[in-house]
Image (spheres, rainbow, N blue to C red):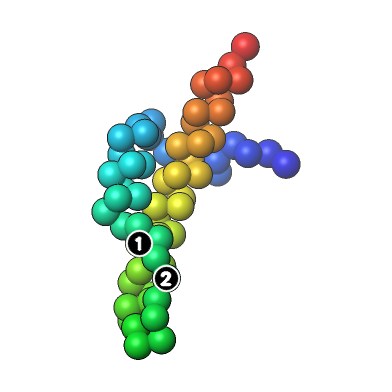
Amino acid sequence: MDNRPLIEVPPLSSALIEALETSFPSRDFTPDELDVSKLGFHFGQRSVVNFLTHHYQLQTETILNKE
């Protein structure tokens, strides 16, 4: 499987990823919080965090594996 990104993502830093993880942590919802708009908003935020984290990992792998 080819792990290269399909788009060019600017260099990302571990500080940015940590800030995003702190600002938009993954969380569980109680039955009282199961509002579609709240869930959608949260998972939209997490989707962006996951996307950037994935690309940060790819960038780090590329740097470490360069010959």
Label 2, residues with CA under 10 Å away: few <14, some 14-19, many ≥20: few
Looking at the figure, which quarter contains the N terminus?
A: top right
Query: Is residue 19 or residue 62 the one in the foreground?
Result: 19
Specify the amino acid type for callout 1: Gln
Which image quadrant is residue 61 in?
top right
At a point 40% along the width and 76% down the height, the residue shown is: 29
Vertical comparison of 67 with 59: above or below: above
At a point 33% along the width and 72% down the height, the residue shown is: 41
Vertical comparison of 34 with 64: above or below: below
Residue 15 located left or right of residue 63: left
Give the numbered dot on residue 45: 1
Vertical comparison of 23 with 67: above or below: below
Does the CB distance between marks 1 and 2 fall below 8 Å? no
Label 1, residues with CA under 10 Å away: few <14, some 14-19, many ≥20: some
Horizontal and vertical percent for residue 20? 31, 48
Looking at the figure, which quarter contains the C terminus?
A: top right
Which SS class for mark 1? Answer: helix
Specify the amino acid type for callout 2: Asp
Spatial separation of the CA atoms under disc 1 and disc 2: 14 Å
Horizontal and vertical percent for residue 37? 33, 81
At a point 45% along the width and 52% down the height, the residue shown is: 50
Q: Earlier in the sequence, mark 1 or mark 2?
A: 2
Query: Is residue 31 or residue 23 the one in the foreground?
Result: 31
Q: Nearer the viewer, mark 1 or mark 2?
A: 2
Which SS class for mark 2? Answer: loop
At a point 46% along the width and 50% down the height, the residue shown is: 51
Do we see residue 54 in this rendering?
A: yes
Kindly identify which residue carries mark 2. Answer: 28
